[in-house]
Image: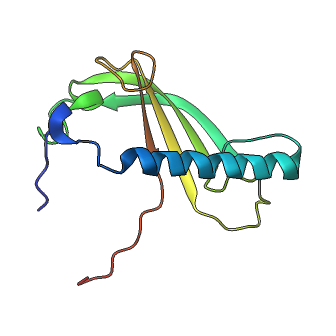
Amino acid sequence: MTAFIRYAPDLEAPQPDEAVVQAGMVEQLAKIQGITLKDDGHAVRGVHAKAHGLLVGSLEVLPGLSPAFAQGAFAAPERHDVVLRFSTNPGDILDDSVSTPRGLAIRNLGVAGECHRHPAGVQEGLLGPAARRRSGA
């Protein structure tokens, strides 16, 4: 069984090349946005440009979660409003007949505590297709 690690601010440290990697990502996203501007006449998001649906709902954190899961937004039993956005991965708007991976973004509203890069009370998460692992690999 996988051992869970409780989050702490000192759990993760920036890697020595993180600023270079981030600058490269920003450069690539700007390049993609420039191409979509040229192709479509207006710029769109660099990735996940085509939304397939938005859902509004609520997420209920149930009591009795194991300590491994009862942290952050899930630390206490409560209900949060959520907004979900389904999209495709590419930065350009492709026809629906083109098969591409899908993504799901979740915006969790009304969360207690400090939130990184978002207004107070807002946390976001992304779900996307994971690489398959072969049995025995």
Looking at the rendered image, the quarter that the N terminus falls into is bottom left
Q: Position of residue 74 (x, y in %)?
A: 26, 31
In this view, 5 is above or below 119: below
User: Residue shown at 17%/40% (left/top)?
Assistant: 11
The quarter of the displayed image where residue 89 is located:
bottom right
Residue 92 visible in this rendered orientation of the protein:
yes
Residue 50 visible in this rendered orientation of the protein:
no
In-front residue for pair 31/41: 31
Q: Position of residue 125 (x, y in %)?
A: 42, 39
Q: Position of residue 72 (x, y in %)?
A: 25, 29
In-front residue for pair 53/45: 45
User: Residue shown at 19%/29% (left/top)?
Assistant: 63
Which scheme is used to colour this image of the protein? rainbow
User: Residue shown at 45%/17% (left/top)?
Assistant: 119
In-front residue for pair 106/117: 117
How many badges with numbers are in the image? 0
Horizontal arrangement in the rendering, residue 137 relative to residue 45 (left or right): left
User: Most extreme residue toward the bottom, as rendered?
Assistant: 136
User: Most extreme residue toward the right, as rendered?
Assistant: 41
Horizontal arrangement in the rendering, residue 35 relative to residue 2 (left or right): right
In-front residue for pair 27/39: 27
User: Residue shown at 58%/62% (left/top)?
Assistant: 101
Looking at the rendered image, the quarter that the C terminus falls into is bottom left
Horizontal arrangement in the rendering, residue 84 relative to residue 44 (left or right): left
